[in-house]
């Protein structure tokens, strides 16, 4: 079976081969079209991916202006697909090199088979796993496999090549139904094709891979409280990069009085003193914070219909003027709290990108709306009922206003990393992380720090148990005029906080930034999510591929995370067999994996395991991310007796030029087959980008080494052994007996391959 690493390498080659400019698509050259009936046609994108279109339009059934609906993100033409077609009295048969399609002439129903028509692929009675079942996916504009959704399944918005917008060409009636079919049959191929057709999830601004802290104090919130929180985070040594201000910034507040949410587009008096908003943001920027504003309004643009709940809709010219005014004052991003608004969100996201240019990335948060229990709205929301296929192109999302219990937290783990997030092609997904007590706060924040997005909606790490009923009242949409804001007294159990746990795990997340960011680029290139459920990461393990372990997952390909989702002292964890696993905290090795019972009595320890052979790109300890400063790189290696490797990706950290191939890829491998002479190989860096360095110093830390080596060679030259402490220069090493690790500092050249030989 093709490994994920080999698949990524192949995909990079294919991307390079197909990066040439193509002609603008037309109805004739966009894809391979097969007419089936007057009102039905088949469009091949690849030999394994197609669209069935049915139309009830009068006259021309499939006009060119309706060629690319919102669900499709690939705008240039596809390669021609070779197919054959024949028919008998009952069926039409169309087949490519990979699949066959059989269409019933009597009712236009269709089935999908293997190329030789011997084995039926679709329909299948196998279970659905996110977007997929039985090695394929079938989806329309709203969802896969007809999952419940509030949106129409018909195509209504289409890409307009002249304006570059999806909103300008609109079909109000339910006239064109597009059904998309992708055959893998393996997960990497399914994700790659979905990524290509629907469009990849773009990289976030690099600081967005840090932590987001929200200020939500209703209209009691002030600039002074925000600045005090910012200072407290720095003083308490807790990493954070992004501050979000809820409707109190001016969106729904005028001084201390609440107004209709979204009815104001400028700052409230609460945030105009003692500093002007611009000076406030400049002060926060000097403290290494970015600022986002939550908005409950949207511009009333052309064809803005069927867009669900938006508290306030404003004149488009006025809305954009005020929106960009806030950006000129230094606001870095927007949280559009306007539900069921994928087309609206895409329009705002796109226009923001055009405004800031390719030199920056959009910082944008929307709503996926899915939670186990919404405290004030008990309508069905345990699936993402509001989002349309195609929304993944405008990340990131939050799951909605969730409740505060262990049950909610447990549900969110599976939803985000598995059923409704990762397995539905949505990797940039976050939950509110608001727990009813300090223990839930601690555990939920641990999960957040080992998710793609780390965010808390309100409670500060140093606060105790919150008054959840009061918080619920502050955040609900109606009836807030009678709410009495009160502070919970810090006595007894309420004195305990999650601060120690949050600080510990957040610092580790920040050290793992190069690892997380590298997988973010891989996600863009391949579609594979950063959080990978066990069924995706270990499809050949029968104890994983039936989704037996929905509350644990892989974070990238090297780290297994098992969030503690209840107030208990132990839990069962499955470490996939055939691998050695290492407890990250204790360095205890679990040979060959298996089912273990893990002690979870220490609330300050997230169960976290490293797969043997893992190579973890890490950086120095810092409490913020500075995209302009190159991090000090450490590659932490957990050896195995096989060959293991990772591809380390990097780019300029700030622009969208990675979309044109401006990024670097470096392969680092560890060959432990010869226990007396393991080798570390570092490839030259493929690709180019602004800021790429020809030479640099990196640290390599080889863990689980029970004895020191006799010598270490770099490209056949022996390195200096600093026997009594950390090395003081490049091309040197020392053995840390207390931690049983070998630490090397080496000078690398990104234009040549390097090889390290460790001799015992």
Image (tube, grey):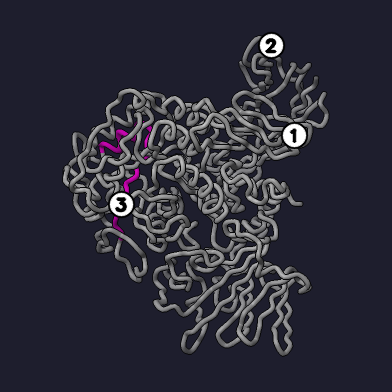
The label nearer to you, 3 versus 2, is 3
Coordinates of residue 330 in the picture (x, y in percent): 31, 43
Q: Of the two numbered discs 1 and 2 on the same chain, state the one appearing first in sequence.
A: 1
Q: Which residue is mark 3?
A: 295
State which quadrant residue 52 falls in: bottom right
Q: Is residue 168 left or right of residue 506?
A: left
Question: Above or below — where is 270 with respect to 4?
Answer: above
- The Cα atoms of the two marked residues, 3 and 2, are separated by 58 Å
- What residue appears at the point 32 percent right and 51 percent down from the top-left corner? 376
- What residue appears at the point 34 percent right and 29 percent down from the top-left corner? 463
- What residue appears at the point 38 percent right and 30 percent down from the top-left corner? 461
Coordinates of residue 397 in the picture (x, y in percent): 44, 51
Q: Secondary structure at mark 1?
A: loop
Residue 238 within the segment the image draws in magenta: no
Given residues 368 and 335, the one toward you in this image is: 368
Q: Secondary structure at mark 2?
A: loop
Q: Is residue 673 left or right of residue 212?
A: right
Q: Secondary structure at mark 3?
A: strand
Q: Which residues are magenta?
A: 279-298
Residue 287 within the segment the image draws in magenta: yes
Q: Of the two numbered discs 3 and 2 on the same chain, state the one appearing first in sequence.
A: 3
Q: Is residue 684 visible?
A: no
- The Cα atoms of the two marked residues, 1 and 2, are separated by 34 Å
Give the class, few, some or many, for how many residues have Cα within 10 Å of label 3's Cα (few <14, many ≥20): many
Q: Which residue is mark 1?
A: 592
Coordinates of residue 482 in the picture (x, y in percent): 18, 46
Give the class, few, some or many, for how many residues have Cα within 10 Å of label 2's Cα (few <14, many ≥20): few
Q: Which residue is mark 2?
A: 723
Q: Which mark is residue 482?
A: none
Q: Quadrant of the C terminus?
A: top right
- The Cα atoms of the two marked residues, 1 and 3, are separated by 50 Å
């Amino acid at each position: 079976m093709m490994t994920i690493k080999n698949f990524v390498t192949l995909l990079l080659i294919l991307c390079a081969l197909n990066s040439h400019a193509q002609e603008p698509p037309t109805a004739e050259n966009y894809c391979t079209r097969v007419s089936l009936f007057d009102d039905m046609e088949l469009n091949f994108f690849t030999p394994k991916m197609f669209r069935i279109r049915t139309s009830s339009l009068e006259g021309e059934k499939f006009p060119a202006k309706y060629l690319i609906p919102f669900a499709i993100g690939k705008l240039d033409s596809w390669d021609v697909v070779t197919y054959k077609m024949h028919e008998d009295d009952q069926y039409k048969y169309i087949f490519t090199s990979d699949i066959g399609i059989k269409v019933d002439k009597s009712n236009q129903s269709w089935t999908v088979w293997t190329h030789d028509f011997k084995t039926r692929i679709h329909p299948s009675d196998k279970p659905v796993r996110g977007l997929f079942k039985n090695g394929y996916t079938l989806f329309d504009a709203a969802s896969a496999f007809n999952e419940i959704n509030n949106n129409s399944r018909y195509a209504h918005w289409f890409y307009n090549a002249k304006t570059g917008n999806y909103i300008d060409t609109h079909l109000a009636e339910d006239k064109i139904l597009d059904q998309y079919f992708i055959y893998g049959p393996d997960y990497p191929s399914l994700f790659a094709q979905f990524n290509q057709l629907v469009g990849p999830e773009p990289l976030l601004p690099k600081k967005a891979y840090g932590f987001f802290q929200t200020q939500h104090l209703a209209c009691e919130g002030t600039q002074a409280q925000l600045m005090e929180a910012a200072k407290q985070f720095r003083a308490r040594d807790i990493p954070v990069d992004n501050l979000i201000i809820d409707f109190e910034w001016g969106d729904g507040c005028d001084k201390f009085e609440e107004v209709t949410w979204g009815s104001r587009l400028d700052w409230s008096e609460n945030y105009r003193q003692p500093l002007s908003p611009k000076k406030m943001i400049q002060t926060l920027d000097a403290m290494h914070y970015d600022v986002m504003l939550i908005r409950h309004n949207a511009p009333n643009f052309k064809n803005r219909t069927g867009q669900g709940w938006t508290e306030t809709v404003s004149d488009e010219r006025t809305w954009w003027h005020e929106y960009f005014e806030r950006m000129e004052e230094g606001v870095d991003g927007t949280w559009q709290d306007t539900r069921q608004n994928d087309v609206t969100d895409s329009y705002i996201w796109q226009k923001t990108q055009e405004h800031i240019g390719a030199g920056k990335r959009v910082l944008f948060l929307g709503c996926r709306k899915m939670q186990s229990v919404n405290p004030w709205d008990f309508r069905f929301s345990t699936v993402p009922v509001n989002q349309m296929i195609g929304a993944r192109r405008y990340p990131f999302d939050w799951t909605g206003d969730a409740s505060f219990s262990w049950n909610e937290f447990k549900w969110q783990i599976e939803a985000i990393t598995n059923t409704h997030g990762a397995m539905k092609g949505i990797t940039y997904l976050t939950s509110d992380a608001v727990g009813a007590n300090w223990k839930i706060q601690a555990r939920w924040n641990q999960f957040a720090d080992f998710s793609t997005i780390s965010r808390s909606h309100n409670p500060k790490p140093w606060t105790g148990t919150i008054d959840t009923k009061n918080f619920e009242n502050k955040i609900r949409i109606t009836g807030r005029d009678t709410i009495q804001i009160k502070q919970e007294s810090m006595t007894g159990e309420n004195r305990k906080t999650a601060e120690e746990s949050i600080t510990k795990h957040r610092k580790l997340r920040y050290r793992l930034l190069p690892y997380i960011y590298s997988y973010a680029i891989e996600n863009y290139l391949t579609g594979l999510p950063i959080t990978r459920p066990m069924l995706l990461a270990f499809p050949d393990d029968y104890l994983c591929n039936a989704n037996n372990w929905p509350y644990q997952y892989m974070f990238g390909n090297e780290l297994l995370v098992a969030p503690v989702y209840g107030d208990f002292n132990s839990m069962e964890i499955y470490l996939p067999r055939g691998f050695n696993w290492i407890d990250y905290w204790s360095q205890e090795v679990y040979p060959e994996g298996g089912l273990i019972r893990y002690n979870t009595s220490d609330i300050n320890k997230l169960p976290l395991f490293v797969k043997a052979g893992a190579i973890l790109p890490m950086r120095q300890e810092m409490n913020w991310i500075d995209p302009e400063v190159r991090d000090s790189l450490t590659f932490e290696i957990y050896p195995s007796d096989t060959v293991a490797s990772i591809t380390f990706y990097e780019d300029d950290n700030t622009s969208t030029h990675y979309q044109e191939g401006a990024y670097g890829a470096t392969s680092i491998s560890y060959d432990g087959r010869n226990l007396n002479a393991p080798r570390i190989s570092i490839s030259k860096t493929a690709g180019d980008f602004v800021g790429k360095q020809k030479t640099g110093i990196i640290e390599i830390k080889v863990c689980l080494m029970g004895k020191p080596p006799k010598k270490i060679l770099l490209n056949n030259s022996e390195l200096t052994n600093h026997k009594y402490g950390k090395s003081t220069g490049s091309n040197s090493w020392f053995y840390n007996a207390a931690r049983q690790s070998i630490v090397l500092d080496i000078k690398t050249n990104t234009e040549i391959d390097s090889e390290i030989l460790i001799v015992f």
